[in-house]
């Protein structure tokens, strides 16, 4: 009998597992991918400090190794059944059935598929990227930065709220991390392409975390990133492969036209498809944004409507690395309380 | 430009288009400016495709232009549209084929409204009965006439005499497609390919050998803008919007423009004349303008119909350069003959636009 | 050319290809804090001149960023240089100096183009 | 009058007016915003503020008459609004209240009623060759002039059935069908609405010292051709 089965080997799952192990519980992580670390593997640097994401990954790799955590890679959960005795039976793709006292859902999020915003021409116009694509490009960058069509960019635009605060995409909620990611990436682009004009088209700038506002100010003052208050309406391709953007400058109350060499779509976070399926299979309640609904928004954000199933990280909604690590730590305490009460 | 991305979008917007047995709703603007296009449409359906389509003398305007000029109340246009449904029902038909894009948008909007507000549908049923003693069924399928040509584009391609290919160079013609705003902008799922990358015309163009030109202002309105054209004092809006499109497409050197909306086809043609006469500008290299076709004319040409039967002589921008590029055989002397072969007077030439 | 009773209209669209950035460049070079403007409108809300006239310092700043200088001169003359905006700005921008630099920069641009014309 | 309450009775308003994010996605692609001093976003925000005086001001202004009804705004709005449909509701109310004659662009409703409006009932079409007179439509070009000069022969050549019995393009709409159309206008308030436009316009014409006689309709010519050119800032 395992104490805690953790679904997801991203930083939320790893942090929860480390903390629970330290509290003396036996844990097992199941991860559907072939490596641990989740989305962090694809990320170049983290806001607001611009530190390499690999540093955080290395930290968790080391902590995981030290504790010799049990991790099943390439394994996904098929079903979770709560039995009459309150214990869980978890079926996985490995033909292994796990029996455990509690489950932590740390399955995270998925990025909005930008193809759904047809008017932005993602996967149609070559120089339209997502924020995640840009991170990958930066991570693997060797030599001079060029756009997908091989141009050294003179003008770059970042588009906030792609697949967020948008009923047309089915996501009415704010993804909250895209604003600060855009500012981070804008600064990064200015650092490596100082000759380029960089624009951010935003609706509201949500600089909610420590160091965020400071970074925003740095983008304005030190890097001269230009902020246009307006949401991108459509993208089209010019004869030379550059892009024409149409966006209202709402502060001037006039339409504007912007020609750019590269466009970066700040894609929002959605509940992971696997989380949705999992929630259905074990009767977890989801909120109107399709993320898992927490039992109490303020004082029970790790608990769900099913006793014994807990959440850690972005399965409850868009969270930063900072938020995720904290949420995962508190998940460990919530599980601890539950298991203690069980004895 | 990545075609795979477009195909992905197209696959999610394939609407159902009836196979046969249509009630034909004519268009005020198309009948007026392109009567031969409606003739060609019926000919293609009946003679080339062997379909049954009923051309009813009893239907009237849908009043859509009046409605969007805000002089016809919403209840009134709904009842006029309901009358057309009644005529369709009385003819024993269930599928309606609409020639006008404004009408198509209206019919779509009205059906959507009735779905959300069933009490509105009941009210209109009462109005129609009170006014005409007629009753109606909701159509099973509504399609714009360009949807129907799109549906049978491959059948047409099999019968084609010509392809949209430059005969001299063997290169596909560069075609600008223009979709009427009310085709899919209000209800993206009701248009083939959706609102952003409509496939209805590009599907025809590609099946018939041409290449579609995607230029930055492709989605912009032709500039009709109802009251903005209908009232002379406002026409600056109309021509300025068309100019914006023409300027944007110019660097792509299109061989011709094709539209599925009758008004758009007319404006893109006539405003090229106006701009040439008013400002001395043309949007091709040689000063003749870019020929503009309706999709019926495009289909007719591909099928080898006589260009003068299709009414190309009534276009302001002359189409001969296009006919020559494709290698279409035609009799230049027959351009201004009447039905009985008598010579009509030759039209005057514009000051600046070359003919 | 023929008169049709109407003519094409100039587009109101802001075209970033064609922005005249002479004045804004001058102001930013000499008062870099102005880069940090949030367009929040605090300055305008407290503005003495704005409460009496149509003067809108937030809008004017934006117009200058967009290179629209036609009305800048007469607008700037409406400012009473009371400096209340300076107290209000959440980003601590020296708004008073910004106004002064706008005036000075505008003067420099105007005299430069006059010189060109005279030549 | 409580204008918001009036607007809310309009189904189009109910369908198209939700809370606004002020993101400007509508204005960015609006053909009218590009060529007029107009911003559909501001229309929605003004109406959303529910200030009766502000709405009345809007109903009396040129602003609501600039929209070209292309409905491009409807495609894009992230909240499912459609400024173009809110405009329709405002225009209806402006006419019902008689405010439309107070603005240059609003007064043009008379011209639209006199041309398109009357054509609908007389010919059964919104547009008819008889109405697209080259002298009123010089922009239609020399070929259109030729079409009109040789009207019957050209339409005949093109397979139309111009103003004749039976089916076909531009056929004469049978009187019984025109009667049905007329009856629909009677039952659904179409005629009443035409009358409101007519009466309010005549009042205004009198005020402006212009005749509205059938033979010398100065006011009609004025509303169709006058442009103060004050529609851009």
Image (spheres, coloured by chain):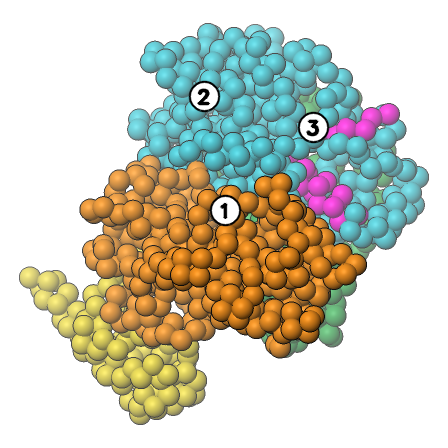
Chain colours: A orange, B cyan, C yellow, D green
Residue B96 inside the magenta-drawn segment:
yes
Residue at image location 35% in from the left, 68% down from the top = A48
Query: What's the distance in space between the residues labelled 3 and 1, CA to CA?
Result: 48 Å
Q: Which residues are magenta?
A: B92-114
Query: What's the distance in space between the residues labelled 2 and 3, CA to CA?
Result: 24 Å
- According to the picture, the residue beneath numbered tag 3 turns out to be B17
Q: Is residue B82 visible?
A: yes
Nearer to us of marks 1 and 2 is 1
Q: Which mark is residue B210?
A: 2
Which of the image's four quarters has the N terminus of chain D?
A: bottom right
Q: What percent of the width, then of the height, locates residue B104? A: 67, 37
- According to the picture, the residue beneath numbered tag 1 turns out to be A73
Nearer to us in this view, D143 or A104: A104
- Mark 1: secondary structure: loop
Residue at image location 73% in from the left, 74% down from the top = D2
Dominant SS in magenta: helix
Nearer to us in this view, A214 or B241: A214
- Circles 3 and 1 on the same chain: no
Label 3 Cα crowd, 10 Å radius (few <14 / some 14-19 / many 20+): some
Nearer to us in this view, A263 or B280: A263
């Amino acid at each position: 009998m395992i104490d805690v089965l953790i679904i997801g080997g991203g930083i939320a799952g790893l942090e929860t597992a480390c903390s629970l192990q330290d509290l003396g519980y036996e844990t097992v992580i199941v991860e559907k991918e072939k490596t641990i670390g989740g989305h962090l593997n694809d990320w170049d640097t983290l806001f607001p400090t611009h530190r390499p994401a690999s540093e955080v990954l290395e930290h968790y790799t080391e902590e995981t190794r030290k504790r010799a955590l049990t991790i099943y890679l390439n394994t996904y959960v098929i079903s979770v059944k709560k039995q009459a005795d309150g214990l869980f039976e978890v079926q996985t793709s490995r033909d292994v059935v796990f029996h455990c006292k509690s489950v932590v859902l740390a399955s995270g999020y998925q990025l909005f598929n930008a193809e759904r915003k047809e008017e932005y021409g993602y996967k149609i116009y070559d120089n339209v990227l997502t924020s995640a694509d840009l991170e990958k490009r930066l991570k693997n960058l060797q030599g001079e930065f060029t756009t997908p069509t091989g141009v050294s960019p003179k003008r770059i635009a970042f588009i906030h709220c792609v697949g967020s605060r948008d009923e047309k995409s089915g996501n009415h909620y704010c993804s909250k991390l895209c604003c600060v990611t855009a500012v981070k990436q804008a600064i990064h682009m200015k650092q490596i392409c100082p000759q380029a004009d960089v624009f951010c088209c935003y609706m509201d700038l949500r600089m909610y975390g420590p160091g965020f506002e400071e970074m925003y100010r740095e983008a304005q003052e030190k890097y001269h990133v230009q902020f246009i208050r307006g949401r991108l309406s459509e993208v089209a391709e010019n004869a030379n492969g550059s892009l024409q953007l149409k966006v209202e400058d709402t502060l001037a109350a006039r339409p504007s036209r912007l020609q750019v060499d590269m466009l970066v779509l700040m894609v929002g976070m959605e509940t992971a498809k696997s989380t949705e399926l999992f929630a259905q299979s074990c009767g977890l309640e989801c909120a109107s944004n399709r993320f898992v609904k927490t039992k109490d928004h303020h004082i029970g954000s790790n608990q769900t409507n099913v006793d014994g199933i807990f959440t850690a990280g972005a399965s409850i909604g868009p969270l930063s690395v900072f938020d995720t690590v904290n949420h995962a730590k508190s998940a460990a305490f919530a599980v601890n309380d539950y298991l203690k009460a069980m004895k | 430009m990545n075609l795979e991305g477009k195909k992905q979008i197209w696959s999610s917007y394939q609407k159902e288009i009836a196979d046969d047995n249509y009630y034909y709703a004519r268009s005020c603007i198309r009948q007026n400016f392109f009567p031969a296009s409606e003739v060609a449409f019926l000919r293609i359906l009946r003679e080339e495709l062997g379909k049954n389509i009923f051309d009813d003398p009893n239907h009237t305007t849908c009043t859509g232009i009046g409605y969007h000029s805000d002089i016809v109340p919403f209840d009134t246009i709904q009842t006029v549209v309901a009358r057309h449904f009644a005529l369709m029902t009385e003819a024993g038909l269930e599928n309606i084929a609409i020639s006008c894009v404004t009408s198509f948008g209206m019919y779509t909007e009205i059906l959507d409204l009735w779905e959300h507000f069933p009490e509105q549908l009941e009210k209109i049923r009462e109005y129609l009965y009170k006014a005409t003693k007629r009753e109606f069924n909701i159509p099973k399928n509504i399609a714009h006439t360009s949807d129907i040509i799109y549906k049978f584009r491959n059948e047409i391609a099999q019968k084609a005499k010509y392809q949209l290919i430059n005969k001299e160079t063997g290169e596909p013609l560069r075609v600008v497609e223009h979709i009427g705003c009310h085709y899919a902008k209000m209800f993206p799922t009701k248009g083939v390919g959706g609102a952003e990358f409509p496939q209805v015309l590009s599907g025809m163009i590609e099946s018939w050998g041409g290449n579609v030109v995607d230029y930055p202002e492709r989605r912009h309105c032709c500039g009709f803008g109802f009251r903005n054209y209908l009232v002379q004092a406002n026409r600056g809006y109309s021509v300025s919007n068309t100019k914006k499109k023409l300027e944007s497409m110019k660097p792509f050197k299109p061989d011709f423009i094709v539209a599925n909306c009758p008004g758009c086809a007319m404006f893109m043609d006539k405003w090229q004349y106006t701009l040439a006469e008013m400002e001395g500008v043309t949007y091709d290299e040689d000063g003749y303008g870019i020929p503009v076709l309706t999709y019926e004319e495009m289909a007719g040409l591909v099928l080898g119909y006589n260009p003068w039967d299709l009414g190309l002589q009534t276009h302001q921008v002359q189409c001969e350069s296009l006919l020559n590029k494709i290698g279409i055989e035609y009799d230049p002397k027959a351009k201004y003959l009447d039905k009985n072969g008598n010579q009509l007077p030759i039209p005057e030439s514009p000051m600046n636009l070359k003919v | 050319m023929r008169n049709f009773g109407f003519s094409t209209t100039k587009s109101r669209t802001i075209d970033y290809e064609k922005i005249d950035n002479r004045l804004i460049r001058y102001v930013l070079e000499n008062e870099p804090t102005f880069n940090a403007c949030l367009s929040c409108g605090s300055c305008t809300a407290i503005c003495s001149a704005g409460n009496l006239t149509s003067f809108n310092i937030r809008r004017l700043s934006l117009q200058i960023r967009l290179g629209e200088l036609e009305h800048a001169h007469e607008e700037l003359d409406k400012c009473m240089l009371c400096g209340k905006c300076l107290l209000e700005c959440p980003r601590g921008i020296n708004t008073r100096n910004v106004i002064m630099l706008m005036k000075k920069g505008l003067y420099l641009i105007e005299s430069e183009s006059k010189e060109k014309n005279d030549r | 009058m409580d204008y918001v309450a009036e607007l809310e009775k309009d189904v189009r308003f109910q369908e198209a007016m939700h809370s606004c994010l002020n993101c400007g996605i509508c204005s960015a692609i609006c053909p009218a915003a590009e060529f007029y001093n107009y911003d559909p976003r501001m229309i929605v925000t003004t109406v959303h503020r529910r200030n009766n005086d502000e709405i009345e001001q809007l109903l009396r202004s040129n602003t609501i008459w600039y929209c070209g009804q292309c409905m491009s705004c409807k495609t894009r709005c992230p909240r499912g609004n459609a400024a173009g449909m809110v405009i329709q509701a405002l225009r209806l109310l402006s006419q019902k209240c008689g405010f439309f004659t107070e603005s240059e662009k609003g007064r043009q409703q008379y011209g639209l009623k006199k041309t398109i409006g009357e054509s609908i009932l007389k010919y059964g079409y919104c547009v008819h060759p008889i109405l697209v007179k080259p002298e009123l439509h010089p922009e239609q070009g020399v070929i259109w002039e030729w079409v009109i000069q040789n009207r019957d022969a050209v339409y005949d050549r093109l397979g139309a059935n111009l103003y004749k019995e039976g089916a076909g393009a531009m056929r004469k709409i049978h009187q019984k069908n025109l009667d049905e159309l007329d009856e629909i206008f009677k039952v659904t308030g179409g005629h009443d609405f035409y009358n409101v436009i007519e009466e309010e316009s005549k009042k205004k014409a009198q005020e402006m010292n212009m005749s509205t006689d059938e033979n010398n309709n100065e006011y009609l010519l004025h509303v169709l051709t006058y442009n103060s050119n004050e529609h851009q800032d």
